[in-house]
Image (tube, rainbow, N blue to C red):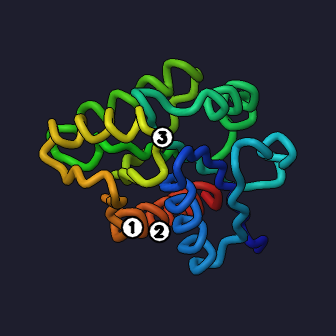
Amino acid sequence: MKTPKLLIVYASKYGQARKIAWRIGDIAQSEGVIVEVISVEIADEYPLEEFDFLIVAGSVHFGRHPRALEEFVRRKLALISTMQCAFVSVSGSAATPDGREEADGYVHDFARRTGWVPEISAMFSGAEPYTKYGFFTRYLMRSIARKHGRAVDVHRDYEFTDWEAVDRFARDFIGYASAKKSA
């Protein structure tokens, strides 16, 4: 039996979606899958048809996933629709129970913009890397964090990702996709 291959394409402005993509890749590798983790900027160079599974991951900034990720999915929609796929959305809204509805809205908005309704999607909390933000973004994000009762020290970074949930998602996706492929 051929070893399955997974491609993870991510778009990450400040690095948290990239970290999550790599973590999913590490877990998938530990499950015996061949994994490639790449930025959306070079995704068109990879022949999707050589992969059994695909995960598209992106962070949300100012209410939207990166346009480059949307454009990639639109360009490859016909092929993506034939693969075992998942979409991973990373946002600050996913960090709180009252923000889950907003985070879910980002996933639906991505589907509307791209025409792709993935069979599996996951939402993970991101981070607030204040030290990486520019002046305007830093203070805008501080006011949003304050509104949601989160820490607001702009001289340090905060990470909200539930890594155990990321690990569970990776294992569940690999198990599900492998079972569907062999069925």
Q: Residue at x 32, y 44 (%)?
A: 92
Badge number at residue 168: 1
Find residue 97 and report its image quarter. Answer: top left
Mark 3–mark 2 distance (CA, rounded to whole Å): 36 Å
45 vs 129: above or below: above
Percent coordinates x, y for residue 52 in the rendering: 71, 55
- Asked whether the residues under the numbered discs 2 and 1 touch, taking CB atoms below 8 Å apart as contact, a structural biologist would say yes
Report the quarter where the N terminus lies.
bottom right
Q: Which residue does the image show at 70% across and 43% down from the upper left?
A: 40
- The residue identified by callout 3 is 134
Amino acid type, callout 2:
Arg
Which disc, if any, is residue 171? 2
Judge whether 36 appears above or below 34 on screen.
above
- Looking at the image, is mark 1 or mark 3 earlier in the sequence? 3
Q: Nearer the viewer, residue 48 or 143?
A: 143
Tell me what residue is drawn at x 57 percent, y 77 percent.
31
Residue 6 place in picture, x, y as percent:
68, 60
Q: Are marks 1 and 3 in contact (CB under 8 Å)?
A: no
CA distance separating discs 2 and 1: 5 Å
Does the image show residue 117? Answer: yes
Nearest the camera: 113 or 169? Answer: 113
